[in-house]
Image: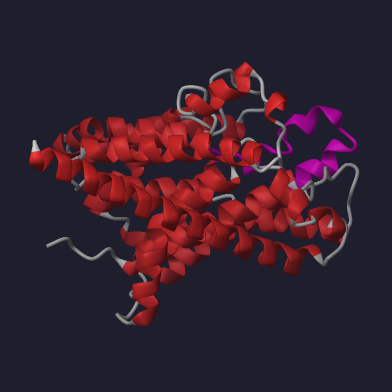
Amino acid sequence: MRAKRQANFELLRIVAMLMIIVLHYLNKGGLLVDYTSDRTGVNYAAHLAEAFCIVAVNCYVLLSGYFLVESAWKPERVVSLAGQILFYSLLIPVVLCGAGVVPAGALSVYDWLNYVLPVETEHYWFATAYLLMYVFAPFLAAGVKKLEKRTLQIIIVILVCYFSLWKSVVPVTLATDRYGYDYGWFLCLFVIAAYMRLYGIPALERRRNALFLYAGMSLAIFGLTAAVGLAAGKVPALAYYMDMPVTYNHILCLAGAVGLFMVFKNVTLPEGRAAAVIRQLAPYTFGVYLLHEHLLVRYEWMRWLQVDAVRGSFWFVPHMFLCVMIVYAAGTAVDLVRQRLFDLATALVAKRGRRE
């Protein structure tokens, strides 16, 4: 019998995706304005929201690593993930062209190449990195479990220094830094999550400590970006560093993500209707991402939901919450239908296989 998913971790999966939508709303909606040109309270509020949500992608990956290190690797899961990515990548342009929203002639051969080969072209950078992490997961899991605890700690220190610490402190742009937008960073997060699963982090087992770490790192990100942004007005050479603290592989973002992950790890949700709803909704979070981040949709939903109307006003706060819920609900509904279609196709293939 399949074990029940832990509702606390499934809730984190949902919260992380909601945070990711917030980040896209703020960034693609044009609400994050350079501090050198906008020092209004509205801009500070938008940057504060970004600082508290920037940990979301890392948390989502940590969740996967935490469970994959002790789970049986299933090749059909790779096929399912690739199929899900291709489903959205191809279906959306077909539907939008068929409905006349996008003129078919407006799409070039290069555009269709992105839709037909979404993983190879990094149509969705996250999906590409996530799928590759899953492919490498059995090798990483086997290696991690064979290492002694001390050896694993040393490896994590080396990985964190290479991917995160150096870029966070040196005043130059590193040629190898992809800001966390790659599978190399995801593999680093996998190893960290595996360590947390195997050995835990005793200092963060108390929710208060973990919450303090998350909140403290988020405020540090906000404070650092604001300070550098204001200083860049007088020292233009600092301008390049303004956005560095809000990159996924910055040390503050990594520490904040670990803190938030440990908060949810140490939360026990009582069994009941709420836990059941959380378990039902969580599996569709990836579909929410694939729908609203499609190349043809990622900027258009800002226009459809009229983000321009609240830009520069504190009304962006309630509008943001409303838009995030609309996008999440729409994505969940679409992926629910997609899952039913996939289940039907799987059943038909299995039935034909039995007949043969």
Residue 145, visible in the rendered structure: yes
Tell me which residue sits at (9%, 42%) in the image: 354
Q: Quadrant of residue 305?
A: bottom right
Q: Is residue 161 above or below residue 303?
A: above
- The residue lying toward the viewer, choosing from 112 and 354, is 354
Q: Position of residue 322 (x, y in %)?
A: 68, 67
Tell me which residue sits at (75%, 30%) in the image: 240
Q: How many marks?
A: 0
Residue 59, visible in the rendered structure: no
Q: Is residue 180 rendered to the left or right of residue 229? A: left
Q: Is residue 282 rendered to the left or right of residue 44? A: left
Q: Is residue 102 rendered to the left or right of residue 231? A: left
Q: Is residue 292 rendered to the left or right of residue 7? A: right
Q: Image quadrant for the C terminus? A: top left
Q: Position of residue 286 (x, y in %)?
A: 45, 49
Membership of 242 in magenta stretch: yes
Q: Position of residue 49 (x, y in %)?
A: 68, 58
Q: Is residue 163 above or below residue 65?
A: above
- The residue lying toward the viewer, choosing from 83 and 62, is 83
Q: Is residue 86 above or below residue 285?
A: above
Q: Position of residue 183 (x, y in %)?
A: 43, 30
**Magenta stretch: helix, strand or loop mostly:** helix
Membership of 48 in magenta stretch: no
Tell me which residue sits at (45%, 53%) in the image: 335
Tell me which residue sits at (13%, 38%) in the image: 353
The residue segment tinted magenta is: 225-250
